[in-house]
Amino acid sequence: MARSRTRDNAGKSAMSWKKHGLLWRIARGQAHAFRVTHPEARCVLVDMHAGDGAGVDMPQLDLFEPSVSRPSAQVAVHVARDIGGADVILCEQNRAKRTQLAARFPEATIVREHHDVLPYLMRGYDWALVFNDPCGYASHGIDTLEKIARTVRSDFLIVFNERALGRLMGMKDVPDKPDPPRVAQVRQVKHRYAWMMEPAAWARLVDKPQVARSRMIHASSGFTYRILVLSTTFCQLIKPPLWETIACKTSR
């Protein structure tokens, strides 16, 4: 049977509107909470996996909600407009998608690689809100996340495919019989990503005292995820039953 065009590694699916809606609410909450206490701060919103900037059709729950979801790139642009005094950087490796982003969001700076973001963050920003929603746990850009945290005061919104990594963690360290080459390669990287299963490890990565994580959210057979919020302070939207907060010792 042919695979669906909305396959798990395509970047979005028919169920992505749930994720987009959560990112919209939490990004607005975190940004407005910061703006209230820092009215003159110069801010920047960074989307490390911007895609093409197009949303997906969503259920028409009432007459006031949009019929198409806001993906992370659009969330970043709209939140920047809401709080004022904020710039937007969109990162996307695919050339065609960068062209689409430029057409949709002409006010944004668009770059190709994660490391291309870093020079822009050295231009006197007081705070960054970073979106990190990759296709797979191997593509978070961990080195860049660490460097962003060291460069500018930052909050991070991480979309983490916990179920997929959990399946990898369930593999035996030593197989009962020789693996096919691809399976052997996957088994070898198991320990490289094991730390991601511990929420506090994400907070330590960017030197934050706490992490908030959502409940598990099912999107497809290959994508059951949590959203992690890494910050010193959380907006009022982050509360049970959807969210739990976990304290973490930092190096500070």
Image (spheres, rainbow, N blue to C red):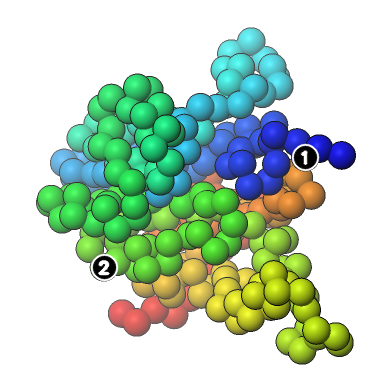
Q: Secondary structure at mark 2?
A: helix
The residue under label 1 is which amino acid type?
Arg
- Left or right, 175 with respect to 202, comes to right
Q: Tell me what residue is drawn at x 54 percent, y 64 percent.
A: 138
The answer to whether any part of residue 5 appears in the image is yes
How many neighbours does mark 2 have within 10 angstroms: few (below 14), some (14-19), or many (20 or more)? few
Say which quarter of the image contains residue 58.
Answer: top right
- Estimate the spatial distance between the alpha carbons at disc 2 and disc 1, rounded to whole Å: 42 Å
The first of marks 2 and 1 along the sequence is 1
x and y, in percent, of residue 21 in the image: 57, 34
Seen from the viewer's position, the closer of residues 91 and 227 is 91
Farthest residue, direction front = 181
Q: Residue at x 67, y 66 (%)?
A: 165
Density class for disc 1 (Cα within 10 Å; few <14, some 14-19, many ≥20) is few
Dot in front, 2 or 1: 1
**Percent coordinates x, y for residue 130 in the rendering:** 38, 50
Q: Nearer the viewer, residue 169 or 25?
A: 169
Q: Is residue 21 toward the left or the right of residue 203 in the image?
A: right
Tell me the residue at 61%/26% (across/down): 56
| Horizontal and vertical percent position of residue 125 | 18, 50
For label 2, the residue is 150
- Which label number is shown at residue 3? 1
Up-down: is 246 above or below 30? below
Please tell me whether residue 173 is drawn above or below residue 144 in the rendered image.
below
